[in-house]
Image (cartoon, grey):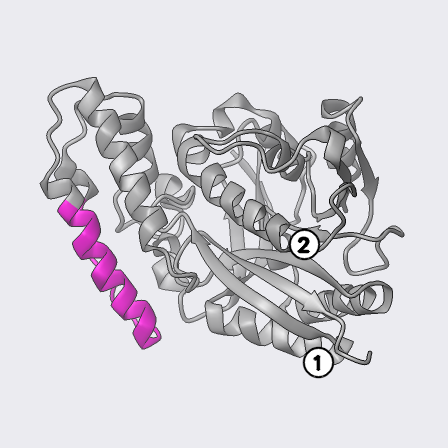
Amino acid sequence: MNTTAATSYRDAKAHYTSPKRRDPVKTMLEEVVTHRVLRDAVDLARRGPDEPLRVVDIGAGTGDGLALLTEPHGDLAPVTDDSRLAYLGVDLDPGMVETARSLHAGRPAEFEVADMRAELPAGDFDLYLSCGVPYSHLPHADTIDVLTGLMRRIVETRDSAVMIVDVLGRYSVEWTPRWPETRWAYNMSFFEGANETVHDQMSFYDRGSLDDALVQAAIGAGARLGAVTFTDRSVLVGRHTATRAFNQAIPPYRTLLNELARGTTDVAPAQLRFTPPAGEVPARVEAFFAAFAERWNGVLAAAELRSPEQAKRLAQALFACEQQSQQGLGVGHSLMATVVVERPAGG
């Protein structure tokens, strides 16, 4: 496989439209987690009962955010439907935008080429969405600048809006050797159908550093932060637990969970055991991994794998363990902040 030091999504966009991308971990866990985050964010958005939900999806790619809003995931009903939605997706890559327009033709959605570091297209939005960690492509200072600009736009045009800020988690087990660093060369070798491994400098966050960025942006914008919540996604099953590109010491958790979810019975529970990683981390991160290991390994200890149905039940139990254990600390593949941005009283 050829590699390139420059980011190129010309081939990588094949990944975003490949059926292989939507493996069981994605459809049964990751999309469900994100769906819940979006549902809760929409509940926080203040709008009239007859008004459509107005969304700008920043770094929209091929329109995953639109699907997350309007399709069911697991046993969750769609967050909204086309008749109650006005959606604008923006992305820096013209090829992604062209693909998104083709995939979602005829829907109440527009896609435009735009750089989030510059002025976004005009519009009044209830939800400033991001998924697929677009903010991690920016240096930390640039992310604060972008968030400041978005928050300033909110307080200058309306009383409040909701933002979802999606970034890479600093303390994922996928890259324990890189934990001391907060920005480093990240390769996207998991892309389906790409002829090149896409490399880019990416920024990583824990809860404290992302919270600090939000506070700095609010101060710069003259905004008030209302409710703020954090959600970890893919604690043990991020895509680089399959590639092990940054940490050869971990089991291929994602691959093994996908096999269980498909009903494969030749995966031994012992293969999935989790040992808390060693390293200098905040105390609450260390405590999280210790408690998570006890809970995860307890599920494995009680498992029986004599039939495809039992394998599928174990996968479901481990997916539930991930969802119920997360604390929004930056210990998963990605970390999502849901933020209500408000105009200060008298502003």
Q: Is residue 144 above or below residue 51?
A: below
On the rendered image, what quadrant is the C terminus found in? bottom right
What is the number of the mark on residue 86? Answer: none
254 within the magenta span: no
Q: Residues within 10 Å of mark 1 (few under 14, many from 20)?
A: some
Q: Residues within 10 Å of mark 2 (few under 14, many from 20)?
A: some
* Kind of residue at badge 1: Ile
Residue drawn 10% across and 30% down?
304
Q: Which residues are magenta?
A: 273-298
Between circles 1 and 2, the one closer to the viewer is 2
* Kind of residue at badge 2: Ala
Q: Is residue 262 above or below residue 213?
A: above
Whether the residues at callouts 1 and 2 have beta carbons within 8 Å, the answer is: no
What is the number of the mark on residue 219? Answer: 1
Q: Is residue 156 above or below residue 269?
A: below
Percent across and percent down for residue 30 are 45, 40
Q: Is residue 74 visible?
A: yes
Residue drawn 77% across and 56% down?
116
Q: Quadrant of residue 316?
A: top left
